[in-house]
Amino acid sequence: MPKSSELLRDIHETNMMYLLLLQRLARTGNADAMAGLQISQQACQWLAALSRDDLAKMSRCSVLLAKLDLAPHLLLSALSQGIDVTLAARTAAAPPEPHVAGMP
């Protein structure tokens, strides 16, 4: 069982990684990448403008901030490999759209 100080440190680290990921998504403005987020355009602009120090301050709370509508394995992949690689893998793994005769 982790000590409370270790658990709090892990929460802070996870929050920082999550905030950095959100900021990167906000800065790219990629609609597909932002699909799992429930953040307004104004909040994205605010997040994109924050400094790393501001993000670090926000990450130092005792509550886990992560809320992303991705399966856990995709979230971990996005944090470790980048969201572009993760979304590309997710798209490649998706079943093809059914084709109806006469429809493009």
Image (spheres, rainbow, N blue to C red):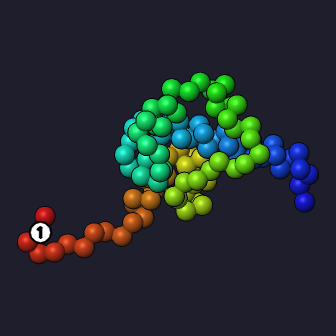
Mark 1 lies on residue: 103
Picture coordinates of residue 89, whole percent (x, y): 45, 56
- Could you tell me which residue is drawn at 74 percent across and 41 percent down? 61
Q: Is residue 11 left or right of residue 17?
A: right
Q: Is residue 13 left or right of residue 99?
A: right
- Could you tell me which residue is drawn at 59 percent across and 37 percent down? 20
Q: Is residue 84 visible?
A: no
Type of the residue with mark 1: Met
Q: Is residue 57 visible?
A: yes
Q: Is residue 6 left or right of residue 76?
A: right
Picture coordinates of residue 96, whole percent (x, y): 31, 68
Q: Is residue 55 above or below residue 17?
A: above
Q: Quadrant of the N terminus?
A: bottom right
- Residue 52's image quarter? top right
- Could you tell me which residue is drawn at 52 percent across and 59 percent down? 70
Closer to the camera in the image, 87 or 16 = 16
Q: Is residue 95 above or below residue 8?
A: below
- Residue 104's image quarter? bottom left
